[in-house]
Image (cartoon, rainbow, N blue to C red):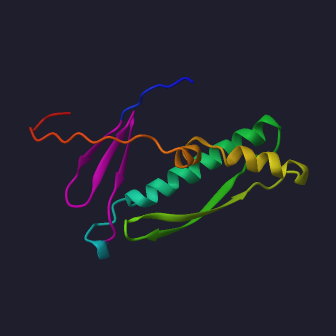
Amino acid sequence: MSEHQNELRVQSSGGDRYDIAIGRHVVSVDQPPDAGGRDAGPTPTELFVAGLSSCVAFYAGRYLRRRDLPDDVEVTARFTVATGPARVSEVALVVSAPGLPEKLRDSFTAVVSHCTVHNSLHRPPEVSFEVRTEPGQP
């Protein structure tokens, strides 16, 4: 099994907004006004579901292109947030792939259901925490 490490950095941008530096990109997350934020970006939970949904879309598009099929994929996600502990308790994904022949439905479903993010949910990564209290520490 081949592994490689990646890194991203999250920094406060005031209030409930945080900027996430991912390579050359910056994505902001925030909370809606009714939860104390300014709605300057999706919530971290929405970004989590978006990560899953976009991973599924990426795998779907690759599958279709490799078979010279139309790759205008759309993924719609509906999700439920539970409390005790706070978590995403359910995600329902609808993958629209116009032009996918019925005979390829099963193999297509198998491929999209094994995207990296979905695999990570089935085999969760080990997560560790190190808390640093000195200013300026990366």
Q: Residue at x 74, y 46 (%)?
A: 110
Q: Residue at x 25, y 61 (%)?
A: 16
Indicate whether residue 17 is drawn in magenta: yes
Left/right placement of residue 52 relative to residue 113 reads: left
Q: Is residue 125 above or below residue 77?
A: above
Q: Quadrant of the C terminus?
A: top left
> For residue 66, what is the image quadrant?
top right
**Residue 32 appears in the picture as rendered:** yes
* Picture coordinates of residue 64, whole percent (x, y): 77, 42
Furthest residue toward right: 103
Q: Nearer the viewer, residue 81 or 8?
A: 81
Q: Residue at x 90, y 50 (%)?
A: 103
**Residue 60 appears in the picture as rendered:** no
Specify the segment rendered in magenta: 8-32
* Picture coordinates of residue 92, whole percent (x, y): 62, 64
> For residue 127, what is the image quadrant?
top left
Left/right placement of residue 66 relative to residue 94 reads: right
Q: Nearer the viewer, residue 121 or 64?
A: 121
Q: Is residue 122 above or below residue 77?
A: above
